[in-house]
Image (cartoon, rainbow, N blue to C red):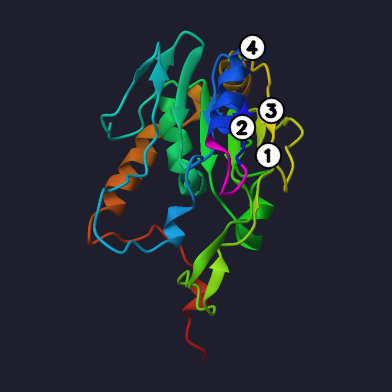
Amino acid sequence: MILTSRPFPFDADKEFAERTSSGASGVNILCLQEAWMMPFAFCTREKSIGRTIYLESVISMKARITWKEIPGHPVFETAYGKIAVNICYGRHHPMNWLAFGLNGAEIVFNPSATVGELSEPMWPIEQTATLLGSINRVGTETFPNPFTSGDGKPQHADFGHFYGSSHFSAPDASCTPSLSRYKDGLLISDMDLNLCRQLKDKWGFRMTARYELYADLLARYLKPDFEPQVISDPLLHKKSL
């Protein structure tokens, strides 16, 4: 299930009630969007140094919550499938999806808080190579004090419109209808966790992948003396007679 969240201020009791009631709809796995119960804190300046808030996911299994930071690309085995969480900007890096897949993820959730014309065109197509729940914040939050976003634009009081459009997609490029761009919503979908395995077998990905070559390239790329493997047309460097 996917839930989006209306911008602040909101009724916290009502929000929790809506999420708690999702179980009555038969929801087995609940995923919320990034920073769902707080303002978009990256737009605020603290008056004093206080508690540090980390960008990390919290996985609750059998009423127990994992607070410990786990490095790498962990996959969590639950009674309802092996799940992974690729937070927001991580979706732009294909190696993240590959790493979760190699670790055996059956479904990956992408909780996000993203805005603007740069990312929205990519939103419906960027994650269609995996069984995925794409969850985005929705609405516009206005802050009392103007701020800059490091984009060269004048100070402004909002970060932009969080365009929602949360959806589920599958590795066969199929996709559910998206939720609204403008209002809070709830999306419930049955997911076939066998689809990833079936598609890998049908396309022969395990047989045709060249992981040893990818690993060698990445190992060389990390070295300071890395030289790209580029084969140039000899005519490009031939001196004119």
Q: Position of residue 212 (x, y in %)?
A: 35, 34
Residue at 51 percent of width and 11 percent of height: 80
Q: Is residue 143 left or right of residue 53?
A: right
Q: Which mark is residue 24?
A: 4
Where residue 72 appears, as percent x and y from the top left, is 31, 35
Give amino acid for label 4.
Ala
Residue type for callout 3: Leu
Dividing the picture into quadrants, the one containing residue 187 is: top right
Comes first in the chain, label 3 or label 2: 2
Mark pair 2, 1: CA separation? 8 Å
Q: Are marks 3 and 2 in contact (CB under 8 Å)?
A: yes
Residue 198 seen = no
Q: Earlier in the sequence, mark 3 or mark 4?
A: 4
Which residue matches tag 3? 187
- Work out whether mark 1 precedes mark 4 in sequence or the reverse, and give the earlier one: 4
SS under mark 4: helix
Circle 3: element type: strand
Residue nearest the viewer, comparing 3 with 92: 3
